[in-house]
Amino acid sequence: MHLFAYGTLMCAEIMQQVAGCLPAQGPATLAGFRRCRLRGEEYPAIVGQPDAVVQGVVYFEVSAAAWQRLDRFEGEMYERRAVQVNGPDGRSLAADTYVIRPAFAPLLLPAEWSYAEFLHTGRQRFAAGYAGFAALKTGQEAER
């Protein structure tokens, strides 16, 4: 199964740490969703919005072990959902992505989350503030 990443996991360095591997990747888009900032966080969430499109990355053939780590990393705030994305060649691909659970919708802000801004100002804060990378290696539940 492929993974559509639209936030911090677009950064190969973070994906490697979280998944324990770095699958082949390419640019992709997901129609029908909007990427939002989350109050007090460096990472985003997506929510359904019919007229919106999210730019991201598709990681190909993610292993079962990597999915286990990814599920722990995303935690209870997100649910893994099957979606159709447009891959690097423009063709539709089945992928899974992480969508915010309705219980956490009050954390959504109206502003769009920017990957470029994350790379410029947020990546170091995210890496410094997220203590769960080590827990992913041991299989313990990680907290953001």
Image: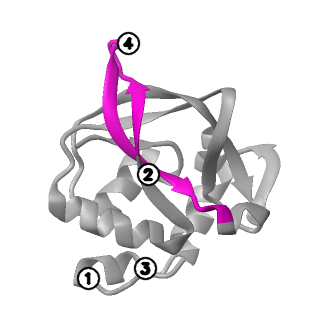
Q: Are marks 2 and 1 in contact (CB under 8 Å)?
A: no
Q: Quadrant of the C terminus?
A: bottom right
Q: CA distance from mark 2 to mark 4?
A: 21 Å
Give coordinates of residue 60: x percent, y percent: 23, 37
Q: CA distance from mark 4 to mark 1?
A: 36 Å
Query: What kind of residue is marked 3?
Result: Gly
Q: How many marks?
A: 4
Q: Which residue is mark 4?
A: 90
Q: Are marks 2 and 3 in contact (CB under 8 Å)?
A: no
Give coordinates of residue 139: x percent, y percent: 26, 82
Q: Earlier in the sequence, mark 4 or mark 1?
A: 4
Q: Earlier in the sequence, mark 1 or mark 3?
A: 3
Q: Secondary structure at mark 3?
A: loop
Q: Which residue is mark 1?
A: 139
Magenta residues span 82-102
Q: Residues within 10 Å of mark 2 (few under 14, many from 20)?
A: many
